[in-house]
Amino acid sequence: MKNREFFLPVIISAATTAVLTVICFKINIIAGVICAVHGALLIVVFAVYTAKRYKAISKLNDYLSLVCAGNYNLDIESNTEGELSILQNNLFKVITKLKTQNEVIEADKLYLADSLADISHQLKTPLTSMLVVSELLESETDPVKRKEFTEIINTQCEKMSWLIQTLLKLSKLDAGTIEISNDEVEIRDVIDESLNPFMLTLDLRNITLKKDITDFTFTGDKSWSVEAIGNIIKNCIEHTSDGGTLEIETNETTLFKRIVIRDNGCGIAKEDLPRIFERFYHGKNASSESVGIGLALSKAILSKENAAVSVTSEEGSGTEFEIKFYKSII
């Protein structure tokens, strides 16, 4: 009596058939035989098909138990007709979805662990430097040396501050807590503001700046666009030797509005190009001061503005970044 839903109808049907058979026998022997045989056949057919359904349901239950145990490599898709088949197919869809979500969660865990390791490494270097210099500063009496040590600490603090702020911006973008406005932005204003923080560096390092700006407007967020383009300019300057050239040009086609930023620096190795926008990735020609997060932030921002950024480079010949603001989303 394991399944009452199965045995109870069988018992009721058998009892009903017996009663009706007795009544039919009293009326007519042939009627009694027909009633008995017909009732027995119906009970057998019901029992066989019901048992088959319960067997299928039990199999589905076993499948779900395995899924709960973490085994998603199951194929219970059915191409037959009926409510049970629909249930099987829906369970297959749920299991497939759970498997995909589980893979995403595992990948996120691995990515988070790698990111935490990278962040720890990036913070550890300036912290160690500041601790060493601060110890030297305590015992140093020479004013010139003390000033030098103080400048080193300030530089490392600025580096840490930039790293932390950039990480916070990336986290907010990932979480969707930052709203990118859709304003009409003048490209000339964005380029000028992006260049402002680097004008002194360009002058000190004798890097020639060439601009060929065709005025146009695009839909985006001015401050975030300045952040994105500024990080690309920063990357180009870091990879350009003293006396080099930085070029910025803008133009417009029937499909998109374009910004091109190029340098004649050391370039990017071919094997590094596919990963250049990954967080904390350091290419073969990356500078010692590079954290490997600025370009990742640039791509994240530009993606929010429905813009595409790409890079082409050749070692020893320089690098070119191309940003396209499409006139319609494709």
Image (tube, rainbow, N blue to C red):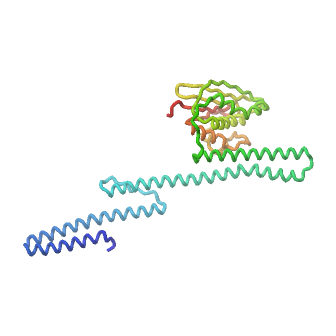
Mark count = 0
Q: Nearer the viewer, residue 188 or 121?
A: 188
Q: Quadrant of residue 265?
A: top right
On screen, residue 324 versus residue 235, left or right, reads left
- Residue 279: x %, y % from top left: 63, 45
Residue 286 seen: yes
- Residue 29: x %, y % from top left: 8, 73
Q: Quadrant of residue 202?
A: top right
Q: Quadrant of residue 259?
A: top right
Q: Nearer the viewer, residue 28 or 227?
A: 227
On screen, residue 259 versus residue 4, left or right, reads right
- Residue 93: x %, y % from top left: 41, 53
As drawn, 14 above or below 61: below
As drawn, 311 above or below 73: above
Task: Work out which residue is located at the far right of the displayed protein and give it.
Answer: 142
Residue for point 38% across, 61% down:
60
Residue 317 seen: no
Residue for point 30% across, 69% down:
5
- Residue 180: x %, y % from top left: 59, 39
Q: Nearer the viewer, residue 169 or 249?
A: 169
Quadrant into which the N terminus falls = bottom left
Residue for point 58% across, 54% down:
109
